[in-house]
Image (cartoon, helix red, strand yellow):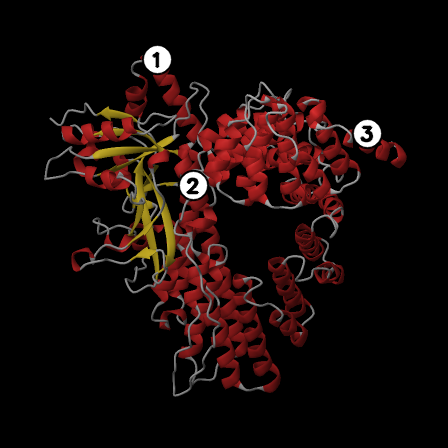
Amino acid sequence: MEEKDINQQIEELNKITREDGKETYAQAQFKLGDIYLKIKHDYDQAEAFYLNIIKEDNPEVYAKAQLSLGYIYEEIKQDYDQAKAFYLNINKEDNPELYALAQFGLGYIYYDIKQDYDQAVTFFLNVDKEYNPELYALAQVRLGYIYQVIKQDYDQAITSFLNINKEDNPKTYAQAQGFLGYIYYDIKQNYDQAVTFFLNIIKEDNPEVYAQAQFALGHIYQDIKQDYDQAVTSFLNITKEDNSKVYAKAQFFLGYIYYNIKHNYDKAEVFLLNITKEDNPEVYAKAQVFLGYIYYNIKHNYDKAEVFLLNITKEDNPEVYAQAQFFLGYIYQEIKHDYDQAKAFYFKITRENNPEIYAQAQAQAQDILGKIYTEKIKKETQATDCFLLASKIVSYSNRYPYQYICAQLILGLKQINFNHDFNEKEFNELKDFIYNKIENLCNLTNNIKNILFISNILDNKYSEKQPERRVAHYTKPAVLFNLLKGENPSKFRLNIVDFMNDPSENQVLTSWLNISNHPDNEIKSFLASFSFNHNCLNQFRLYGNEDNIIGSGISIAFNKNFFGLDTERSINNEIISLHSIKSIKSFENKQVKLETEQIEIKSANTLYPLPLYRCLYFDPETEYMALAKRNKQSFYLENKKEKIPEDIDSEWNEYIKTLDEPKKIRCIRDNLEKIKGLIKELLDNSELQKISNLDELLSLAVLPISCLIKHAAFEDEDECRMIYITHIADDNIVEPQDYQSANSLYVEYTHVEEYIDNIYLGPQCKIQHKIWLQNHFKKKQRKKEIKLIKSEMPLR
């Protein structure tokens, strides 16, 4: 419409007064307001016209005017309180559709601006599907987000997301399916259901969310199902046009699969080269360091490797930048033998970039300085100081435990030989011997730990139920009371191994290896015990008894969501690293001090989620071995009302077949024999025998599995364990509050109620405990019922 026509229309509308009729006047004022809002963008004048409309003129036009006023104050003037006032003037009776729009606007203000999520929920719930299906879908997806991310009420979030139909709003439907996939993947760990939701998202509905869904599918197929061809298909479905940032991630994982799984290094290189800095600087940095590794390790083109590594800047990805500088330092140290340049690269790494790599780099730099003093300047005292400093910097960690152990052994040798001349060639040979044996030792230990890791719940074609979907923790009713009580329940605890009732705890393996555990070791293990058998008479006899009444305890059956899949979390690398950096001890009146930057490591107040491992039962005398697992009786107890004995037997046999215990035992036995041989070689070395804490350092190499290996006499307990290894100064360790509790050190895990499926009451558990639990659970509204089951196991 031309300007002349608009002005003429304004002139005509301005002639209409209330005397011409209230409804006609209201319509005219609303049209004038719209002209000034949408065409002339004179928001003050638009507001003036809208404000001339009163409800008595025409309730529906009044509602439209109030909605427009709310829009002006929300979107243009950003006066959210005034916008809220206008939106609240709209009643459902005036116009249900406009009311829905106003309620959504109010929900948005409380959700996005005021962050009052309870009030936002109230308004979003007022948006009815009947009057505006598209807006209803938008309201439901925001409700789902609030329940998922803010309130962490995942079942309610699922309900909201499932309320959204594709017909209502295809784009929002795609978002909802993505959120549902995430909940089932990350929270419920129901990967098949997650796949179903992700597959519901098609590119036409929402290309960006489609890319994210395909990436999630690729991750599930790669890491969970290990179906690499299907993972490749999913990653290849993602184009740069859909979502450039996710495209870069997908290309990186394609490179990873073709490198590590398919061993097609040229194809891996092609995918990695597809990633540009503009797409995703962080992933670009990872791709460049990966390419550097390919040219270093596979193609042995060190100059080309250097080119890729030099492409990474600190701004792209500080952590990967540190890795690249470390890699460059290593190339110049070990390949090019340019120690000055190597040292320069190592010193570019700061603690803020990557604390773990920083420590390793500082150690390498000091090692180089030691070599320079030894080989070029011939100053043995300064060389020794540098070697000592390098040894003290390296820390015990999940990824590189061997480096810490090796560094401490070399430190011990240097201290012993400080006042004596030593043959550099012999010393280097000894150092190579130590690194070779300790690295192999740690790798073998890790192999066993991975075999014992309960990574996936075993599938069983004879049952819809996964046989190891739950494990039970036997304890006293008083402990359960504290875990569930009132508004401030306690968190589940992992207790320190040093104070366990069993004196052989953590010593079966080390005794067999002829090394001793030292109680003064500052690196400590904490654990919590579970059983595959939830209703076991022997467990009720031994654990959780109150008032000296046998069988008075309880068994808490936890579902798989209580545990995690990331084995890296079992060792607290950061805390150990922080406390491993100390001043070097003075010896022979010469003191070298390491100045360390103080780092504040804030506790997240939770260790959740930690992985779960099955125990290995081992008799050192006969070398008998067995894995913890469900016993056959547990299958009968679970299925006695549903299946005939023949079907239960088939289910049990399939479980045993899937577990593949003989193969796992063969692998573990082979690894343990190799570990024993390596330990013997180290113990028999005459130079290493001079190190006073040799046993303590060697025990660290097998520490991750020491508390997973129990004496075969306890086999009927069928135990699995959650472990956490950390420094004794870890802030997560709860100190005793009184003298009576001085023999109790523990770390807190997480609250338990949402992870409990069943509670078994021991044969002689007091009736008042059952009544209290019934009352507690009946008072709470929950989607999933926690079953209380009275054990009928006979004590005599």
Mark 2, residues whose alpha carbon is within 10 Å: few (<14), some, or many (≥20)? some
User: Is 84 on the left or on the right of 465, as rendered?
Assistant: right
Determine the image quadrant of residue 26.
top right
Q: Residue at x 10, y 39 (%)?
A: 548
Kindly give the residue lying farthest to the front in the view shown.
19
In the rendered structure, which amino acid carries the disc numbered 2? Phe
Mark 1, residues whose alpha carbon is within 10 Å: few (<14), some, or many (≥20)? few
Residue designated by label 2: 453
Residue designated by label 1: 646
Question: Quick one: SS at disc 1?
Answer: helix
Question: Quick one: SS at disc 2?
Answer: loop
Q: Is residue 691 above or below residue 79?
A: below
Q: Is residue 643 above or below residue 784?
A: above
Determine which of the numbered discs, if any, sits on residue 397 in the image. none
User: Is 120 on the left or on the right of 64, as rendered?
Assistant: left
In the rendered structure, which amino acid carries the disc numbered 3? Glu
Which mark is nearer the camera, 3 or 2?
3
Residue designated by label 3: 12
Q: In whole angstroms, how far apart are the C-alphas of marks 3 and 2? A: 81 Å
Instruction: State which tag comes first along the sequence, 2 or 1.
Output: 2
Q: In whole angstroms, how far apart are the C-alphas of marks 1 and 3? A: 90 Å
Where residue 116 sits: x, y (%)? 48, 42
Q: Residue at x 53, y 72 (%)?
A: 428
Between residues 53 and 136, which one lies in front from this camera angle? 53
Q: Is residue 239 above or below residue 429?
A: above
Where residue 622 sits: x, y (%)? 29, 43
Question: Quick one: SS at disc 3?
Answer: helix
Where residue 241 sits: x, y (%)? 76, 38
User: Is 444 on the left or on the right of 791, as rendered?
Assistant: right
Q: Is residue 294 above or below residue 187?
A: below
- Check the picture and name the quadrant holding the C terminus: top left
Q: Residue at x 63, y 70 (%)?
A: 348
